[in-house]
Image (cartoon, grey):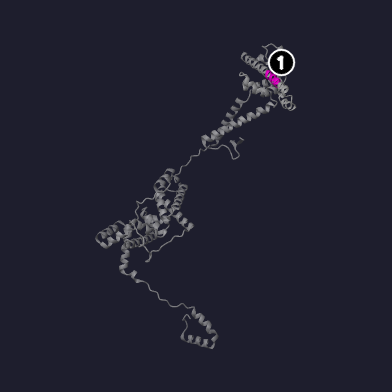
Amino acid sequence: MDNELSQDQVKMVNEFLLAHPDLKAEFEILMSTRLPLEEFRFDKNDLLADSMKQTLVDEELLLYIDNELPVDKKRTVEAEIVSDNDYQLQHQLLLQTKLNPSEIISYPNKKELYRRTEKVASFKGWMRVAAAVIVIVVAGLFYFKNSPHPTSTDNSQNNIAVEKNPVQQNEKKKDVPSNSVSPSSKNLSNDQVAIVKSFEKKKESIQNIVQKKVVEENQMTQDVIALNNGQQQEKEIPQRPKVTNVQFDGTNKTIALVEPKVSVNNPDVTSSSIERNINETATVPEGTIASNSHKGSIKGFLRKATRVIEKRTGIDPTNQNGELLIGAVAINLK
Amino acid sequence: MTEKEYNECVNLYADNVYRFIVKNLRHEEDARDVVQTAFEKLWRNREEVDGAKSKSYLFTVAYNQMIDHLRKVKRVYLKEEFKEETKVHDKHVDNARAVLNEALARLSETQRSLVMLKDYEGYSYEEIGKIMNLNESQVKVYLHRARLQLKEYIVKVENVI
């Protein structure tokens, strides 16, 4: 099949195939695997001298247009363009394939490409410690400035003690001359004594007004009861006597209930003074109120300080849990 | 490269890069994305990029980005070959620039990029090779073929008109 046998050998193979016809089919299959002969023709025109010359001209002109020719070659081409019309025509045609660099297509939104780096203030270790110290000092000053003086708390306690037994106090007042306002007044200055006196006068006037009001209300209720004589109305009206029962004898409840009316009728009496009385006579333990208010004020201050730091520096001094970080200490602001 | 130099690059080259990409992709939004990505990359690598080479860096990144984009999107282009039976006589072409743009649109991405980098940006064969990851001979051969195709198209159109 590959034509590698001698004539004798070929003859022997043929005889063998004739002697064994069953192998002839297999031999034909093997023979069919040979590729058929095909004819190919290469176009030689591209290799002819004229075509080669044309290609060279194009290449020279293209290199000239692309400005990739050396200076001496460039001059030669320029001279050729001037002298040869065909050369010039070809040059003109190739020049038309050149894009115009003056064509401008603007990017729609250049602003989105500009960048600005934000400078991040780096705090060194000592700066952090200093900041923590300053915050603690300021917070401490604020705390001590706003916290009530120890002596004043004593006085308030004394006042509460006095208020708890107003009847006894009234009795004592009758006995004791006006100069001797309280046992502690001996240690007070004249101004303080005057303030205490005026406060007591106001207190007496409030008591009188309250008594009058209570009496008036009692009369009014009695009148209403008399007019209606109805059991149902009697049931409704007795809600008032809660006030009437609590006649002014210096007890805390009376002041608390009648307080708004007093402030309306008597311009001398300010709400703050009443509030103070209420606070003084409140049954809630004093220590708890004071401590809560202090905590709130400190936290409020720290929150304000946090906001100021955040505004000024742009750095959030709190962690993810909303706790203020001072050095290694985290304070919960909520 | 400093921040100021980067912003100057935006001023100087954003339009050029955009023109290069939009003419290749023929899709404004995609071109915008590619340009944005190129500048984003320049900004991220500004420490390593020399200010003098920022333009070619931008074109290189934009070109690679564009090729990636084309591979990803796999848009179906009705690509017409420059054959004898190409029907160009049906179109009324107003001027030479329009004809040229028409011819340019018929080139392959590589050929179009070569022509634009040469004509618009004035890069040398060597620089174009660096941008497009080709050697100088390839640039020369591909570019010359592209020009001859353009010339052939222009001549045909002019003959018809």
Q: Residues within 10 Å of mark 1 (few under 14, many from 20)?
A: few
For image coordinates 51% across by 82% down, the residue present is A28
Q: Is residue A223 above or below residue A104?
A: above
Q: Quick check: is A214 in the magenta stretch?
A: yes
Residue A56 appears in view: yes
| Chain of residue at mark 1 | A
The quarter of the picture where residue A62 lies is bottom left
Q: Quick check: is A215 in the magenta stretch?
A: yes
Outermost left residue: A83
Q: Is residue B20 above or below residue A41?
A: above
Q: Quadrant of the C terminus of chain A?
A: top right
Q: Which region of the structure is painted magenta? A: A211-220
Q: Is residue B21 above or below residue A265?
A: below
Residue A327 appears in view: no
Q: Nearer the viewer, residue B108 or A320?
A: B108
- x and y percent of residue A302 in the render? 58, 32
Q: Nearer the viewer, residue B30 or B146?
A: B30
Q: Nearer the viewer, residue A188 or B84?
A: B84
Amino acid on which the number 1 mark rests in the picture: Asn
Callout 1 secondary element: helix
For image coordinates 56% across by 30% down, the residue present is A134
